[in-house]
Amino acid sequence: KKREKEEEQGEPSHLTKEDIQGAVLQMNEKAAYDRSVNRAIEKISSCALGEEPEDTLQALQSSLLSVGEFDEQNYVRYHKALQRAVEEKGQDLTLDEVNEVIEEVNNQLRLEKLFADGMEDINCRLRGGEPGVLLQALHNPHCHLDHIQEENALHYLSLLQAMAAAKAEQTGDPDAHLTKEEIQSAIDRANAQEVAVLSVNSALEGGDPDKTLEALLDEHLDLAGVYQENNDYYQEGLLHKKREKEEEQGEPSHLTKEDIQGAVLQMNEKAAYDRSVNRAIEKI
């Protein structure tokens, strides 16, 4: 106050009684305000250590504090985060520390919203039936899905659609959504099936019925009706099927899982028929 007066007058000066009295009253108000602010800040920490999130929300809403913007609907999240911060520090938080915690929760809420939107997008794209569009949704970085291979897009689509239909039937909810874990499981399963399919195609070219049988029995293929005694039939029938497909397409090609399953069942029928014929001949 004295320095201000000297600066205004441009020469050394002293405070009058009235100046002093006014400054004293002004400082009393400032001290009272500062103590009120400090109590409001301390109240946030004490409420955070309590068990009533509503009290923490009320403390954050104090008109004395310049608390950062927060979503009141998620007050329980703020309460728990502030509680952890106070416990870790072992003493009351400063206002800056309170705002840091609030910003951390806000960031987490934003990421969760982006994740939820991404998952919603994937489930919606499944209904569209377009592999390329689904692949784009699967690549959303906020969904945190791994091992996505573009060449398996059609397989992802068919497998995820089947899973979605099964879940809808099981839950009775036609709009039941697949979770991240279910989607990741389908991606990994489709990838493993594609590797197993390639192994079958490779074994066929190798010409060893036992190796072909081993590839057909891979659990990732999940084929129905593969029998050891029909291994020679599988080798002959599947290789024939592969050659037919290559001739139709006019280029080297490989059998899909559906091709393999169909040929396996067809060869089982042929093997059963041949055995019946042989038994009939033997009976004569």
Image: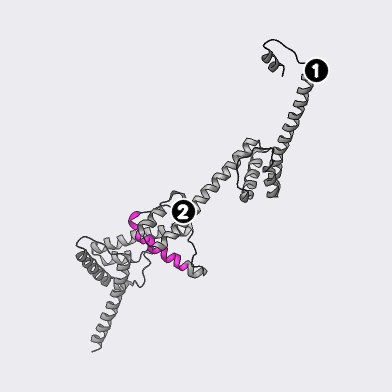
Instruction: Please name the residue shown 75% across and 26% down the image.
Output: 26
Kindly identify which numbered label has been placed on residue 118.
Answer: 2
Q: Main secondary structure of the magenta part?
A: helix
Residue 88 rendering spot, x and y as whole percentages: 64, 40
Residue 19 rendering spot, x and y as whole percentages: 76, 19
The quarter of the picture where residue 183 lies is bottom left
Q: Is residue 92 above or below residue 56?
A: above
Q: Earlier in the sequence, mark 2 or mark 1?
A: 1
Q: Secondary structure at mark 1?
A: helix
What stretch of residues is rendered in magenta?
A: 150-166
Q: Is residue 65 above or below residue 53?
A: above
Report if residue 165 lies within the magenta region: yes
Instruction: Please name the residue shown 44% across and 65% down the image.
Output: 163
* Left-right relation of 10 to 133: right
Gap in Å between the C-alphas at discs 2 and 1?
A: 70 Å
The residue wearing badge 1 is 17
Q: Residues within 10 Å of mark 1 (few under 14, many from 20)?
A: few
Q: How many marks?
A: 2
Which amino acid lies under the numbered mark 1 shown in the image of this protein?
Answer: Lys
Q: Residues within 10 Å of mark 2 (few under 14, many from 20)?
A: many
